[in-house]
Amino acid sequence: MAAEGVLVSKELVTRSAEETEALAERLARGLFPGVVIALDGELGAGKTCFVRGLARGLDAVDPVASPTYTLMHEYRGRLPLYHFDAWMQGREEAFLEGGGAEWLDAGGVAAVEWAERVREHLPEERISVRLAHRRDAGRTVRIEALGSDPTTARAQRLAELVRTLSSQSASADAHAE
Amino acid sequence: MSELVLGIESSCDETAVAVVRAGREILAAPVESQVLEHARYGGVVPEIAGRSHLRVIRPLVDRALVDAHVTLDDIGCIAVTSRPGLIGSLLVGLSAAKGIAFVRGLPLVCVNHIEAHAYAATMESEGEHYPSLALVVSGGHTALYVARSPFELELVTRTLDDAAGEAFDKVAYLLGLPYPGGPSISKLATTGDRTAYDFPRCKPKRGKPAFSFSGLKTAVLYHLRGQDALAPTPPPDAIPDRADVAASFEEAAVDSLVAPTVAAAVELGLPRIHVVGGVACNRRLREKMKAAAAEQGLTALFPAPAYCTDNAAMIAGLGWHLWKAGRIAGLEADALAQ
């Protein structure tokens, strides 16, 4: 990821799976059609958990589960959410090349787990979410709005989304709940 | 009238054809696996799967008929998997089935792959099988259904995160064991101590049955890092207690399947449990499920390992019941991904 492509970057800390999910839910409230969310982080970092929060924020009724073996899951909500998983890199690449990439821009929101493995298939304008383990069992969540041209309306909208998200901390939110 | 059903299955990466009499007597059930073709990609590639099905389906139909010592003249009905699965793969089997049905003037029935898995548990034993609680557990599925008849399934719950088979594969990856992870872990587990580590079990919340394997996967990761989340994951050959980890993980994964399933059967007043799908091959799961069910006065039934994984005997078997119930499909029948 080229540093110059980063429009806005924020680092937040969540203290539990519930907080990670709540953070994703807040992000999802502002999502608009065509947004791709690239999720990275090692096994157990909370990628599927984050997608569950996105689904809740999009008012999706279908249960979220890992799509590692099923290529893609679709959840119906305010916007359709397309859930990809590139754990099996070669297979997901072949899927994306074979027409699966159409879902990235099908008027819904696409969430891609293990996104780094299929980065060349993702649009430059996207939201990157990197989840990392912390010693205290919490997670560090780095959220970035990415795009090569910061002047497009779309890039500005993505940047605004990430900027406003960072204005309230995950822990303050958890307290409010 | 012939009671023979020709079954065709092509929903994922196995092409399978079977000849089954009256829903249970399996005359032939050859399976052509594509595992080697997909191995270099680390999983099933839909395009490759579709083309591979196309290549083997015709010869496999011939082989099933020859193995069963019958010809198409002896067949009374064609049964085929129409959902769920990879569309490109399903269409190969569905088109082949439609072709045979049309040319031979035979009735066609469309079978739900999940329902057929659940039915597989009943094929090798006589007696009452319904109502039952079906646990469908594989790489892509972990779900409970109430089965009131061979083709009346109602979803009770499914996994909140990962499927059980996926957890086996991911832990196998951490331990440097080959794919698929289930058999690899089970083999190593036989040399380890199942009580070495107390990994977390998924517990039902508020009386509602639920499965979850994500926390277990993370617990194994943290264990390998010496409970320091930020430490690097050690390379597999630097893990001194691999067998104990495999054994303790398998025990926790099995308990996470057994406890919610038996609790749900008791709660729903169902006298029998059918455990099906690839993970139903797991010997420890078979032992513990049978024991836990017996403690509650319930019975637990498993298909033979060959009929736990994808096969066409279950398609022809369930197809016979659908045929007899008059659930004939038209030639316009569609394949559905879900």
Image (cartoon, coloured by chain):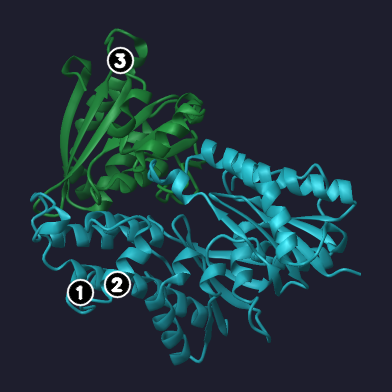
Q: Nearer the viewer, residue B140 or B235?
A: B235
- Give the alpha-carbon distance from disc 3 to disc 1, as whole Å: 49 Å
Are the residues flagged by discs 2 and 1 in contact, CB closer than 8 Å? Answer: yes
**Is residue A143 at all visible to an observer of this figure?**
yes
The chain holding disc 3 is A
**Is residue B201 at all visible to an observer of this figure?**
no
Task: Give, as a three-letter code, the residue at label 3.
Answer: Gln
Q: Quadrant of residue A151?
A: top left
Q: Nearer the viewer, mark 3 or mark 2?
A: 2
**Residue B198: assigned label:** 1
Residue at label 3? Answer: A156
Question: Badge 3: few (under 14), some or many (20 or more) residues near its Cα, within 10 Å?
Answer: some
**Residue A71: assigned label:** none
Q: Secondary structure at mark 2?
A: helix
Task: Identify the residue shown where x is 42% and y is 87%.
Answer: B291
Chain A representation colour: green
Q: Position of residue B225 (x, y in %)?
A: 11, 57
Chain B representation colour: cyan
Task: Give, as a three-letter code, the residue at label 1.
Answer: Asp
Task: Identify the residue shown where x is 52% and y is 28%.
Answer: A99
**Residue B252: assigned label:** 2
For marks 2 and 1 on the same chain, the one whose residue lies earlier in the sequence: 1
Q: Nearer the viewer, residue A55 or B285?
A: B285
Task: Give, as a three-letter code, the residue at label 2.
Answer: Ala
